Image: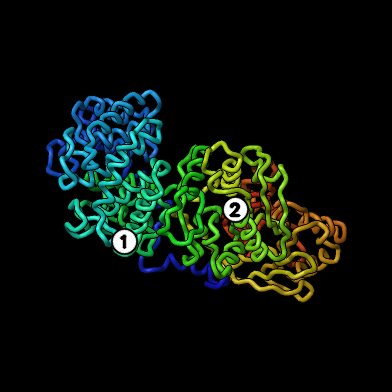
Amino acid sequence: MSIQFLWAALSAACVTATPPVYDDEITNAIAMITTELTARHSEGSCWEPKERSGGWLTKYEGATTALTTLALLSAGQSVNSTVIQNSISFLSAIENPSTYVLATRTSVWSMMPDRQKRNLKKDTRRLVSTMGLQAGSWGNYGTPPKSRATASPLNREFGMIALREAQRCGQRVPKKCWMALAEATLATQQPCGGWAYGQSTTSGTPTPNMTVAALNCLLGVDELCGNDLSVGQSQWLHNAIEKALLWLNKNAHSYENVGGTTLMSYLYGLERAAMSCGLAEIHKRDWFEDGARATIKTHCGIRKAKGSTINLSFALLFLSRGRVPIAMCELAVDKGNIDPLRTSELITARVSEQTERSLAWQTVTSNEKLDAWFAAPLLFLHDVRAIPKSTESLQKYLDYGGLLVMLGARKDFQEFSALAATLCPNSRPKKVDDAHWSLSVVRDIKNVNVTTWQDGIRDRILLVQGSAESLVRSPKTTLSRVLVNICCGAAELGRWKPRACEPISTRSKRIIWVAEHEGNWDAELNGLQRWKWKSKPIKQLKKKNLILVGGLYEDEATATLADEVYRVASAGSTVLVESIGGKDTFASAIQTHIEKLHSNTFTTDERFKLVTQRGWSIHNTKQVHPPIITKVKDGAIVIANCDIRNALLNQTAWGVHGYGPKFAVHLLDTLLEE
């Protein structure tokens, strides 16, 4: 895809046969389902059905209440709310829960404050004690299955998810449990890479929901027990995961389920698996967008949610957990390859802990569309094998506002340095000092070598010297803290985009003219692709609808240039002057020249009083002022002594002082339509 057509391609998604689903619609669906589930709550029986059915969950006492409680907590319901407090009491009173209820109840306790940790410890021990090690699974109640042939793969999945949440909360789960789960799951994988409900390598046809259930088990084992496996065991495990991912990419969809359970329960398991391995797409489609669209179509009416309580709860779990922002995209050799160190996952978990919010990560490859790379504030590269043969996509990524962060030691460091030099031939590499944001924005860090390739506006590439092995060793290592700093800074300290972020639309179809001059007039032009734009030397410009004059540094704002600005404004043009990047005073220097040469007075432009500003500006208490304006005969000069162009890229970046993206688009749209 050419640079010229990137913005058009992003906007064209709005008119495709399957319209995109954006975060506003998803958050509205979450609120609608939450309201409906809360309304269905009964003080005495919580969400239990009046009559037991033969459904795989509703037939068990407490199953509906446990699942609905988990869903509401995941959607942000307060643990102190009446409905949650009632359900806690109800669930605690169930003395002989089924495996489904016990597992889901354990997951509920893992989301509770410390005062509920006693319940978590108790149910974790119960799950461990009722697990059949030979079968690698659980029975429907306390008696474990006698063999793998009689074991339920869904019991295994629910039990594994519960034990994983418990161990993440500090509960001890014996290694033998994880090994039993792994061995049973690996032993029942079919040669094609999928799983069937029947517990052998040949019984039945593999289905998406059974494959997702098994994949969740293997991913859980890899996360919590991977470091304790032998080389051979680890290779067996990772090969099986990669085969499962290949099978899903060939056979599964995220808008339908052909495997026996409801679509919503399948999507619940799919979301858990996709988030665990950083999966961005299934079958070359965005699994979350497809799943969200199907969920909203099935369960959200005009005024209220509809469907069974069980299905609504699964739907709420899928939407609320799946929509979380993506902290980083890892550039990988292939999306099916598993990083044995789980580097990106561990960094993301540490950023989540630092920011106290849920975050995700995902893998991308050089074969994917560029907009997939922009799902996160940065692109992370730590495997030299993932360097694309052609650097064209990486170059476009950087030109459109991306930040490439590389981690390497020794030969890898040298190879990454060479890549950076190729991508940024006009930037000299510079070793950052302790004041650089990568070493100071969240925590002050010393003795880590970080090199930057900067263009005068933003860091395009950061190369951190070190190995992934050293980084994952402990969250307290300086290397780990540097990556946390970089992730937080790249997101402008909290400006995380939701997964289904709606692009900013433009109104005007008119042409923007960019004035060429002797300074850095052509910096950060790609954001203007939202409109039609052309450039011409300012001396050749006459009356135009909107002329954009930008520069990086004060010394570019000469009296001669200011005189040309005044001339084209006098001819009837609106001239917008900006300080690209916002760190220097190019625009205010032009203003000063005009005031001295022509005695004009600038005043606040009343159309643009409510400005939004960038994270760097807020963090450093640098006020971003509204544009100021002066009339010149039939035209006008508008001064913005801060950044506009970088904001038009709609990508977060630390170090830019200026307007937020929506305001920047609104500013240009308004001036174009005068």
Rendered image quadrant of residue 162: top left
Q: Are marks 1 and 2 in contact (CB under 8 Å)?
A: no
Dot 1 or dot 2: first in sequence order is 1
Amino acid on which disc 1 is placed = Trp
Horizontal side, residue 88 vs residue 581: left or right: left
* Circle 1 or circle 2, nearest the eye: 2
In the picture, the disc for residue 247 is: 1
Residue in view at x 22 percent, y 41 percent: 134
**Which of the two residues, 10 or 110, is positioned nearer the viewer here?**
110
**Which of the two residues, 167 or 511, is positioned nearer the viewer here?**
167
The x, y position of residue 109, in whole percent, is 33, 31
Amino acid on which disc 2 is placed = Gly
Rendered image quadrant of residue 171: top left
Mark 2 secondary-structure assignment: strand
Instruction: Look at the image and name its color scheme.
Output: rainbow
Q: Residue furthest bottom?
A: 540
Mark 1 secondary-structure assignment: helix
Query: Is the residue marked by circle 1 packed among few (<14), some (14-19), or many (20+) residues within 10 Å?
Result: many
Horizontal side, residue 108 vs residue 451: left or right: left
CA distance separating discs 1 and 2? 32 Å
Rendered image quadrant of residue 493: top right
Horizontal side, residue 153 vs residue 221: left or right: left
Residue in view at x 66 percent, y 49 percent: 450
The x, y position of residue 11, in whole percent, is 48, 66
Camera sees residue 574: no
The x, y position of residue 75, in whole percent, is 37, 40
Camera sees residue 250: yes
Q: Dot 2 corresponds to which residue?
A: 408
The x, y position of residue 148, in whole percent, is 19, 46
**Which of the two residues, 195 or 423, is positioned nearer the viewer here?**
195
